[in-house]
Amino acid sequence: TFSSTAVTWIFSTKSKETESLSMNYASGVLVACAVMFIRVSVVAALFNVQVLMWLLIPCLLMAVSAGGYAYYIIKTKTPKADMINESIQLGNPLDLMNAAFFGLQYIAITLAVYFANIYFGAKGLFISGIISGFADVDAINISASKLSLIQISPTMAAMVILFAVISNTLFKIGECYIKGTRELFRQVVIGLILSIVIAGISILFIYINQTT
């Protein structure tokens, strides 16, 4: 499994080890986030196309926003290849330990979402989405999309997933602040702030449309 959260952690750490490559690592974090936004819509589509209908435009806009700023950094702010003495260390965000952790996380989140909906209703689902989003979006995405077939509405599932996207994006920004250079943090905030706004507006739009 590809983890954009793990990529953010690794690249943030590496930026302090090689500060001259902070811009390169910042663009890498933003590209990973853009891929994650696209993956959110793809995963939802695998389980319920009706959920995808509410997520497609927000996810595309968020991906274009993050990816577009990453492209801008690469073109205008990163040092030329012949000026770089250090090599970029990618780390290993793809491994069996990560896949095993995701499996356990998915089971825990599925149970949490199921019981949160039973005992706390919509409020419990939103809280589950926000908390689970700190670690990963895929697990809550799969759980909410599958539950939208039998237990909750597609609009509710879409809002839960978008709440998870917001919390996960904020968590990544926190990773950059704690582990990365100030320059990496600043560029990632600039690159992701619009995505957070897009997700927030989309939640409001979905909520208004489901209550009218």
Image (tube, grey):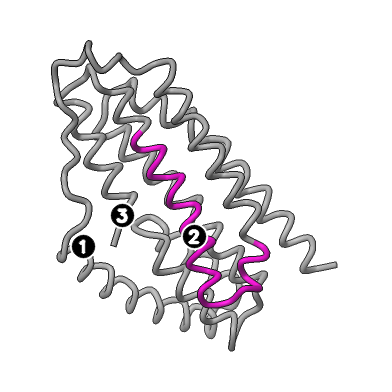
> Which numbered disc flags the more N-terminal residue, 1 or 2?
2
Q: Is residue 191 left or right of residue 83?
A: right
Amino acid residing under circle 3: Ser
Q: Name the residue carrying label 3.
A: 3
- Residue 196 colored magenta? no
Amino acid residing under circle 2: Val
Secondary structure state at the residue bearing disc 2: helix
Residue 20: name its quadrant: top left
Secondary structure state at the residue bearing disc 3: loop
Q: Main secondary structure of the magenta part?
A: helix
Q: Name the residue carrying label 1.
A: 98
Amino acid residing under circle 1: Asn
Q: Cα distance, mark 1 to mark 2?
A: 18 Å
> Which numbered disc flags the more N-terminal residue, 1 or 3?
3
Please state the extent of the stretch shown in magenta in the rendering. 28-54
* Crowd rating for badge 3 (residues with CA inside 10 Å; few <14, some 14–19, many 20+): many
Residue at x 51%, y 74% (from the top left corner) = 46
Q: Is residue 55 left or right of residue 37?
A: right
Judging depth in this view, the residue of 123 and 180 nearest the camera is 180
* Crowd rating for badge 1 (residues with CA inside 10 Å; few <14, some 14–19, many 20+): some
Q: Name the residue carrying label 2.
A: 40
Residue at x 53%, y 69% (from the top left corner) = 44
Q: Which residue lies furthest to the top in this view?
A: 83
- Picture coordinates of residue 74, whole percent (x, y): 40, 24
Are the residues flagged by discs 1 and 3 in contact, CB closer than 8 Å?
yes
